[in-house]
Amino acid sequence: MARVCFTVQVDPARLAEYRQRHDPVWPEMLREIEASGRRNYSLFLRDDGLLIGYYETDSDEASAAYLARSEVAARWEASMQEFFVGLDRRADEAATVVPEVFNLKQQLGAL
């Protein structure tokens, strides 16, 4: 299982509107995320606009490929593009992956 953490920058002047767009996310987009194989998906947003995302999946490559082919995901990403700073492509493709350096369960299992 892959555990993926990523960051992207949201325009700090548009945080309230960004939060509103996620409450709720389109039902068809929720189903596409699930169908892509992503689980335990969460987004966290700091007051300075730093967005931190986390999800688990069996294959991040397969999940990303599924969403890249999805018409629903393309519409969602296009509708959200205006909120991100300094991106020249879809946020889900341009996000910076953060390497994992510690995992409690993994280290406890090694004891």
Image (cartoon, helix red, strand yellow):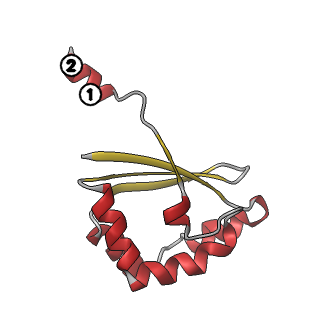
Q: Is residue 54 left or right of residue 31?
A: right
Q: Is 63 located above or below residue 3 in the figure?
A: below
For the point 40% across and 74% down, the residue is 68
| Disc 1, SS | helix
Residue placed under numbered mark 1 in the picture: 106
Q: Looking at the picture, which amino acid does disc 1 mark? A: Gln
Rendering coords of residue 95 (x, y %): 54, 56
For the point 73% across and 62% down, the residue is 11
Rendering coords of residue 33 (x, y %): 35, 69
Q: Which mark is residue 110?
A: 2
Question: Mark 2 and mark 1 in contact (Cβ < 8 Å)?
Answer: yes
Extreme-right residue of the structure: 13
Q: Quadrant of the C terminus?
A: top left
Q: CA distance from mark 1 to mark 2?
A: 6 Å
Q: Picture quarter containing residue 78?
A: bottom right
Choose between 37 and 89: the one closer to the eye: 89
Q: Is 101 located above or below residue 4 in the figure?
A: above
For the point 37% across and 65% down, the residue is 64
Rendering coords of residue 14 (x, y %): 74, 66
Rendering coords of residue 50 (x, y %): 65, 50
For the point 60% across and 74% down, the residue is 80
Q: Looking at the picture, which amino acid does disc 2 mark? A: Ala
Extreme-top residue of the structure: 111
> Would residue 38 be visible to someone looking at this image?
no
Q: How many discs mark residues in the rendered view?
A: 2
